[in-house]
Image (cartoon, rainbow, N blue to C red):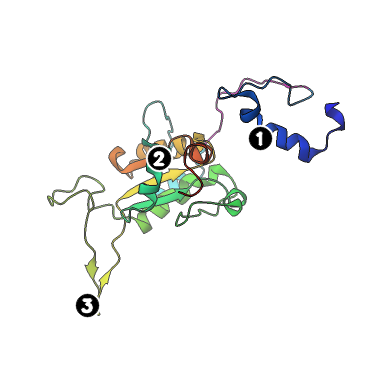
C-alpha cells in the first residue's frame, strides 16, 4: 500500500511521526518500504579547505571543545542581545526557507565552505579585543560602548560574542568547535542553540 502513496502524503507521515507515535517518537508503522543503515565516521563532515590562507588550524572535535549550549527557551534572549552576532550555519537554500530575524546568512552552498567564511566574518564583524579574549579594561562582559566617529556620532558597537544555529544541532556543534579550536574566539564567547531549529520549534510556542 505504501508504494501507492504520493510523495506529499509520505512526507507528511515522516514529518508527523512524533505525534503519531507518542512522546518517544516511536512509529508503529514503517515509513519507508526498506531502509539501509551505513556506518559513518561522522554524521556531518567538516573539512577546512583553504584554512591555511586565513591562518586557521584545521582540527575540529566537538568532544574536546564546543560552544556553550543555549536552551530553546533562552534563545530569544540571545537573539535580542546586541552584543551577540547570530549566525545561521545552514546553506543558502535552507536559509531561504526561513531563519531567525537578524541572523547572518553566510551564503554558502556547502558546509565545508563555512569555516573560512566564519573566520573572515568574525574578524570583520566582531570586536576581538574588547572582551573577546579576556581584556583587562575591567568592564562588563558587554564590552565597549562604541566609538565616536569623525562627525562626533557614536558608531555602533561590534558584538563580542557569537551564537550559531542549524537545523538539528549537529552542524552548529562542529562550527562552534571550529571557532574555538581555530583560536579566534575563547570558549566563553561562543554559543549555539541546543537541538537546533527543530528543538526550538518543538519547545517554544509560535506566538513567542
The alpha-carbon separation of the residues under discs 2 and 1 comes to 23 Å
Left of 204 or right of it: where is 156? left
Mark sitting earlier along the chain (1/3): 1
Q: How many marks?
A: 3
How far from the left and from the top, in percent, is residue 138? 12, 50
Q: Quadrant of residue 184?
A: top left
Mark sitting earlier along the chain (2/1): 1
The alpha-carbon separation of the residues under discs 3 and 2 comes to 40 Å
Whether pointer 1 and pointer 3 mark residues with C-beta atoms closer than 8 Å, the reply is no
Whether pointer 3 and pointer 2 mark residues with C-beta atoms closer than 8 Å, the reply is no
Mark sitting earlier along the chain (3/2): 2
Which numbered tag is attached to residue 152?
3
Q: Residue, x 22% and y 67% (percent of image)?
A: 147
Which numbered tag is attached to residue 73?
2
Of residues 31 and 68, the one nearer the viewer is: 31
Residue most toward the bottom? Answer: 151
How far from the left and from the top, in percent, is residue 12? 71, 37
The alpha-carbon separation of the residues under discs 1 and 3 comes to 55 Å
Q: Is residue 152 magenta?
A: no
* Crowd band around label 3 with a 10 angstrom C-alpha radius: few (<14), some (14–19), many (20+): few
Disc 1: which residue: 15
What range is drawn magenta here? 34-46
SS class, disc 3:
loop
- Is any atom of residue 142 visible in this view? yes
Q: Is residue 126 above or below residue 148?
A: above
- Frontmost of labels 3 and 2 is 2
SS class, disc 2:
helix
Q: Is residue 36 magenta?
A: yes
Which numbered tag is attached to residue 52?
none
Q: Residue, x 79% and y 38% (percent of image)?
A: 7
Give the dominant element type of the magenta stretch: helix, strand or loop.
loop
- Frontmost of labels 1 and 3 is 1
Amino acid at each position: 500500500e505504501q508504494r501507492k502513496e504520493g510523495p506529499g502524503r509520505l512526507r507528511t507521515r515522516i514529518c508527523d511521526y512524533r505525534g503519531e507515535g507518542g512522546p518517544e517518537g516511536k512509529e508503529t508503522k514503517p515509513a519507508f518500504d526498506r531502509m539501509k543503515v551505513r556506518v559513518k565516521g561522522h554524521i556531518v563532515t567538516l573539512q577546512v579547505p583553504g584554512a591555511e590562507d586565513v591562518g586557521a588550524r584545521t582540527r575540529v572535535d566537538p568532544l574536546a571543545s564546543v560552544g556553550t549550549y543555549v536552551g530553546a527557551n533562552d534563545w530569544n534572549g540571545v537573539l535580542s542581545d546586541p552584543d551577540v552576532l547570530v549566525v545561521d550555519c545552514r546553506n543558502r537554500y535552507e536559509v531561504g526557507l526561513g531563519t531567525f530575524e537578524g541572523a547572518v546568512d553566510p551564503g554558502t552552498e556547502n558546509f565545508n565552505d563555512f569555516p573560512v567564511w566564519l573566520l573572515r566574518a568574525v574578524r570583520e564583524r566582531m570586536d576581538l579585543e574588547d572582551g573577546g579574549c579576556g581584556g583587562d579594561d575591567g568592564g562588563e562582559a558587554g564590552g565597549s560602548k562604541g566609538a565616536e566617529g569623525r562627525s562626533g556620532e557614536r558608531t555602533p558597537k561590534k558584538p563580542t560574542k557569537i551564537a550559531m544555529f542549524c537545523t538539528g544541532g549537529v552542524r552548529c556543534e562542529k562550527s562552534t568547535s571550529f571557532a574555538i579550536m581555530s583560536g579566534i574566539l575563547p570558549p566563553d564567547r561562543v554559543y549555539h542553540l541546543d537541538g537546533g531549529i527543530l528543538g526550538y520549534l518543538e519547545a517554544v510556542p509560535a506566538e513567542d
